[in-house]
Image: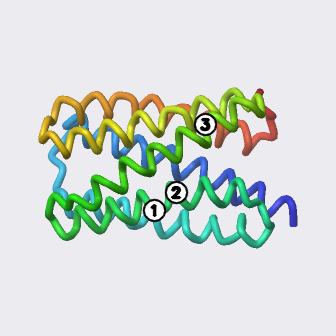
Amino acid sequence: MVSVAQTALNTLFWEAAVMLLVIGFVNMGVGKNEPRDFGIVLLSGALMETIAMAFVIMEGDVFGATVAAAFVLLLWMLGIGLIVGKNLMAMNHALWFTGIFFALIAAELIMLRAVMLSFAIGLLPIITILLAAAHYMNKPVIGKVAGVISIIDGFAFFILAFAGAVGIVLP
């Protein structure tokens, strides 16, 4: 069953990479992006991550499931908010608090000396807090900065997913 949990975590890395790249490019203003279309993409990712998270939970990986749950919350919340089409203040609060949670997880990963994973997770608090700030202050420039960091983080998660797929253990 360990291979199922590892596969599920690797799937979560892959989906995080894709979602972060989508979030990054949309926040950068690349292409013509319809908010509802963006919301559907995020909800699709949320559904896939929820399924993968279920396998991590079944394996009993509390740490992996908790981190996945935070990311799944973000995707569901952002996807629903974009489909509804309103600037929901509670969504901004959830972004902010999830960012704080990701900062605590990143600190724990640093103590565990998981260098690559702590880097990838460590960018999430910056992204989420900047996105919340962009919405609180209605400053799209802050959202663009979050977009650039999100793209970098997406590539970091791609590296994690690829390394896991080919059996390379990163520091």
Q: Which residue is mark 2?
A: 70
Image quarter hosting the C terminus: top right
Kindly check if marks 1 and 2 are in contact, taking CB atoms under 8 A apart as contact: yes
Helix, strand or loop for disc 2: helix
Kindly check if marks 2 and 3 are in contact, taking CB atoms under 8 A apart as contact: no
Query: Mark 3 or mark 2, which is nearer the start of the sequence?
Result: 2
In the rendered view, does 93 fall on the left or right side of 83? Answer: right
Q: Kindly indicate the quadrant of the structure image that contains residue 58.
A: bottom right
Outermost right residue:
1
Residue nearest the viewer, comparing 38 with 150: 150
Compute the Cα span from label 2 to label 3. 13 Å
Q: Which residue does the image show at 37% across and 60% down from the upper left?
A: 42
Q: Residues within 10 Å of mark 3 (few under 14, many from 20)?
A: many
Helix, strand or loop for disc 3: helix
**Residue type indicated by callout 3:** Ala
Compute the Cα span from label 1 to label 2. 5 Å
Q: Residues within 10 Å of mark 2 (few under 14, many from 20)?
A: some
Q: Which residue does the image show at 51% across and 49% down from the upper left?
A: 16
Helix, strand or loop for disc 1: helix
Q: Which residue is mark 3?
A: 106
Residue nearest the viewer, comparing 70 with 169: 70
Q: Which residue does the image show at 65% across and 37% down from the upper left?
A: 160
Q: Which mark is residue 73?
A: 1
Q: Which residue does the image show at 73% across and 42% down from the upper left?
A: 164
- Percent across and percent down for residue 125 are 45, 38
